[in-house]
Amino acid sequence: MTDYLIRGARVLGGAPTDLGIKDGRIVAVAEVSGSTGGAVETIDATGLIALPGLVDLHTHLREPGREDAETVETGTQAAAMGGFTAVHAMANTDPVADTAGVVEQVWRLGREAGHCDVFPVGAVTVGLGGERLAELGAMADSAARVRVFSDDGKCVSDPVLMRRALEYVKAFDGVIAQHAQEPRLTEEAQMNEGVLSGRLGLRGWPAVAEEAIIARDVLLAAHVGSRLHVCHVSTAGSVEILRWAKALAEKQGGWSVTAEACPHHLLLTDELAATYDPIYKVNPPLRTAADVEAVRAGLADGTIDVVATDHAPHPHEDKDCEWQAAAFGMLGLETALSIVQHTMVDPGLLDWAGVAERMSTVPARIGRLADHGRPIAEGEPANLVLYDAGVTRTVEASELASLSRNTPYAGMELPGRVVATFLRGRPTVLDGKLC
Amino acid sequence: MKNRHLLSAGDLTREDAELILSTAAELRSLADRPIKKLPALRGRTIVNLFFEDSTRTRISFEAAAKRLSADVINFSAKGSSLSKGESLKDTALTLEAMGADAVVVRHWASGAPHNLAHAGWSRSSVINAGDGTHEHPTQALLDAFTMTRHLAPEKGQTLDGRRVAIVGDVLHSRVARSNALLLRTLGAEVTLVAPPTLLPYGVDTWGVQTSYDLDAVLPKTDVVMMLRVQRERMNASYFPSVREYSRRYGLDARRMATLQDHAIVMHPGPMIRGMEITADVADSQKSVIVEQVTNGVAVRMAVLYLLLGGAEPAIATGTPDEESEQQ
């Protein structure tokens, strides 16, 4: 295994220092003088920011079942290009990841691909059907060691089932990641319910459908003393409810709620639906500018704990059609860090230490990952990303590593570029290219 | 007219709208002639692309195109969001390959004409003949044309300040959206009357009045336009029963008697007699519902003629010169 000496990297945006990597671990965080000798490859990281390898709590890798949209191989390549060293693969595959067999298959495919670690998310209910619990314990005990469970794409709307799931996963320190969407309030919903949905004649997805479920779920988590994670928070009201809930959890103890926000909800608004271009069709939908502002503020003050991509690849034909016929979802892995820089760091809402916390440390903690989200310090696993925050790039859909092309940022000029990603001391990306 | 497509009534400037209406007035006179045909669009191909059944709208466009001597192809590609069938894109590419000059599209999905015009699939002019619950701009134009004939018949008269009440299922109505946009452009004062459940979110930003009380609106209005209300809405709890809906929002003879003498009753069709309108009202002297259909052909002729590059007056020339390719 090649050892690396990274020269002049700014750890969490701080003063330049050298990083020594040996046998998959960080062995030095200090100025290394003179020649190091031996089989050491030196990387000039002058001006680059070093962050712990990013961890995504919310990725759709589509395999098994929709290999025309993405595979574990291509999805994890996209992840590595985005600076991720671990992704949580959502359960809405075909077959659904609701048994130990399927989660182990996904986990094994990730190991074989080797671009980043893949941690399968287990379905909460059999077939995402919302009727009875899947064998959560079997998935937790499997080789994939599942700790995050979600019916993402569908809401566990039955309050009794949600209560039982929250209680049941306590036995193996699991967490329920809820896709908060009251189904009756969002039947055939196409976009954010607001002034624009009324004008465009598209069925609205009201904020209350998200907020009502979050409010219910935090009360349930408090009642049964469980761990709840709220997926893709998109409205100002949700942020307010979470702020209240976190204060309550702090006071009461014994239960917790965490939440994620997606890059697109930090930048894009429902105004884009006026193009009727389904590239902007996503669930939860793009909201108003006021919601974007509130989500940014929530992420800045820690009400929202993490950034998660909700990377959702779709083949061209599922987006090159009428809005109502199109699939929900957009790509996210390869642009996430740039969007976070653009929306949070550049405006001064978050520093690079804050980025590391929200995109690596905390998501790893929520997923109970031992070797990810660790500090950049001697003896720690060498999961790292080197990022050039000083450049701008124009996003080209055709240049993405993902198998799909449904990025809403095509043609947009964004700051920053991932230069290198290291997974346990081995580069998965070098000079901005896949290894 | 600068526009190449007609996707939304909101895209029309006042000048555009007035040009269409005055052109339609010229063409309307044709309806009274024994030979109803003009050579204006000879050699041009117009496709009626209908993803949703609407015999009356298709026939109206077909008559309009044929009276302008265009070649008409009717293309019915029925399908719902559940059984998609051939995609809009492939259909568009097929029509493009056939050399369609204009595509008149009716679609169940809001925005489908917008996709057809802007996704780069086709170079034809696109005319929205009703998309989902979004818009139906030629219906609004024919409604404005009909109102003008009754309320502002003399040259120089306009709809400025005229009051129009649009009553019924505004939420699901493309006719209401297009009318609200166009009538505002033309200076009329629009009041949308419906139970609160059938008014769209954000209607307060539309620049129109809203009311839940039909009886209060009727004595002051110059036009009352009744919208179709589907019985199925009752099952989704938009209102409790047909009977209660009719009682509160239906137009019957008693209510009609409270209208001003000059006021007219309109309906875009198809009507559900006994639901939003009673038979005696629909067939009354105040009703201009049948005339709306006649005017529809003239207005659609004007739209086709102007969008397909009619630079000269539609009737005056009489010679079938090759129209210049303005696009």
Image: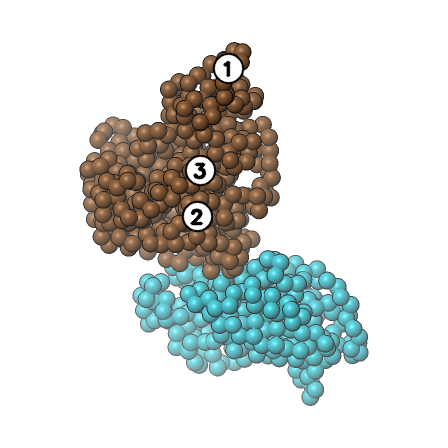
Q: Quadrant of residue A112?
A: top left
Q: Which residue is mark 3?
A: A115
Asked whether residue A123 appears in the rendered view, the answer is no
Query: Badge 1, how many Cα within 10 Å: few under 14, some, many 20+?
Result: few
Respond whether the residues carrying marks 3 and 1 are from the same subunit: yes
Front one among B219 and A189: A189
Name the secondary structure under disc 1.
loop
Q: Nearer the viewer, mark 3 or mark 1?
A: 1
x and y percent of residue A192 in the render? 44, 50
Q: Colour of chain B?
A: cyan
Q: Gap between marks 3 and 1, in whole Å?
A: 28 Å
Chain letter of disc 2? Answer: A
Amino acid type assigned to the residue bearing label 3 in the image: His
Q: For this rendering, which residue is in front, A236 or A33? A: A33
Q: Residue B83: name its quadrant.
A: bottom left
Report the residue marked by disc 2: A71
Q: Which callout, 2 or 3, points at the residue further toward the start of the chain?
A: 2
Q: Which mark is residue A199?
A: none
What residue is shown at x 47% (from left), y 45% (from top)? A74
Residue B304 on image: x %, y %: 66, 71
Callouts 3 and 1 close, C-beta under 8 Å: no
| Residue A365 left/right relative to B271 | left
Q: Which residue is mark 1?
A: A36
Colour representing chain A? brown
